[in-house]
Image (cartoon, rainbow, N blue to C red):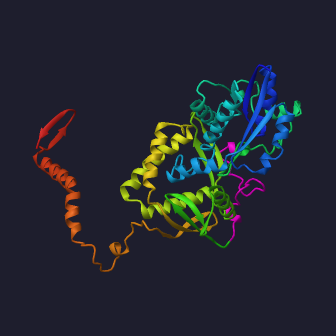
Amino acid sequence: MNYKILLAYSGGLDTSIMIHWLKENYKDCEIIAFCADVGQGISELDGLKEKAINTGASKIYIEDIREEFVTNYIFPTVKASAKYEGEYLLGTSFARPVIAKKMAEIAQKEGVSAIAHGCTGKGNDQVRFEIAIKHFLPNIKIIAPWREWEIKGREDAIAYAQKHNIPLKINLETNYSKDKNLWHLSHEGLDLENPANEAPTNKKDFLEISVSPENAPDKPTYINIGFEKGIPVNLNNKKVGPVELVEELNKIGGANGIGILDIVENRLIGMKSRGVYETPGGTILYKAHQILESLCLDRDTKHYKEILALKFAELVYNGLWFSPLREAISAFVDKTQERMNGNVKLKLYKGNITSAGISSPYSLYDAEMVTFEEDNVYNQKDAEGFINLFGLPTKVRAMLDEKNKEAKPEWTAYGKGDLKRD
């Protein structure tokens, strides 16, 4: 064989047919499959090795990178409070750079000539994968079959698989495009392509991590999350690792209908797309972290951090995790989190999350300062001088407007263009 191609392989529709297609169109090549375990679950990983080998791969790497994913990608994003377009918790977006990083390591180990992926030419993931790969392997060839082959859509892809006896776990009727990892599950395609259609969240087997709020228990669930420097480390007063924490919050949040999001988002390449996301554990963590920051972060830092959160989310969504600006913002965020220690109690009820109490040794809340009763720390008369100085620019401008109004002659118009002074 002349050269090796490393294929990002999930065993889903697209990559299932790509091993055969690559061998068919890139003669004398060896296909090495790579699958990253980012928490998609045993149902997606079961039988993957046998399937890859049986459809033409010479070998397959299945690498468990869940802890790296949570520690180095998820937690920094939560600390930054980053949400794309104010809602999307970036579940697919920040999974791509960690997958690409591991893939680049294997590509170097195997000495491959090219890296291939199953991202479509319409989506964001092609950008995320390829920019991350270029960060580590700037000169490697990248093959994207969706930008080359004659297959026009998912119906054609299923027909190709059937023609070449490639086993699939889907059919035309249930063929939602899904992406699942430890953080979330996304649903796209079929009836969701029409934004006028209500998402079938009460339809059997549509939701996989969560139940709909209507089907959640009638009794609230209380949980307690402990943070150290902005990182969640305790759940219900028990120290847990990063992977276990997210998994447990997914179970608890999913059972209470938390974190179901139906949005139309702006893709990087310019089109809008509609997706339904399940992110129960992530939604809980974002809320808990936000509540803790409300107690421990000073006003100016909090407001400026909110501005940077928008940019952070945009960078991650657009595939620029490995960029100087994202790293610089993360350095700022880490500084803001130095005193972000404390415990947050939450009440979960039918899709809603409310604060049930916060405590921190670094709390900036002073009950004696803000009380409506008499206190010994605040002189209310000081507010008069503050308002006079703070409002001085407004007062000066108003005085100037009043002066100019008095000096301005009054004119009355007669006919077109004729003015007469009163």
- Is 323 magenta? The answer is no
Q: Is residue 97 visible?
A: yes
Rendered residue at 69%/34% (across/down): 106
- Above or below residue 43? Residue 13 is above
Q: Position of residue 328 (x, y in %)?
A: 45, 42
183 displayed left or right of 13: left
Which segment is the magenta one? 192-217
Q: Where is residue 168 in the image (x, y as percent from the top left)?
A: 84, 40
- Above or below residue 208? Residue 325 is above
- Above or below residue 158? Residue 285 is below
29 displayed left or right of 283: right
Q: Quadrant of the rendered structure where residue 6 is?
A: top right
- Is 198 magenta? The answer is yes
Rendered residue at 72%/53% (across/down): 200
336 displayed left or right of 57: left
> Which quadrant would the C terminus be assigned to in this image?
top left
Residue at the farthest bottom position: 374
Q: Relative to the observer, which residue lies in front, 350 or 142? A: 142
Q: Where is residue 64 in the image (x, y as percent from the top left)?
A: 70, 46
337 displayed left or right of 114: left
Q: Can residue 89 be seen in this view?
A: no
Residue at the farthest front position: 109
Q: Where is residue 150 in the image (x, y as percent from the top left)?
A: 76, 24
Give the prevailing secondary structure in the magenta stretch: loop
> Which quadrant would the N terminus be assigned to in this image?
top right
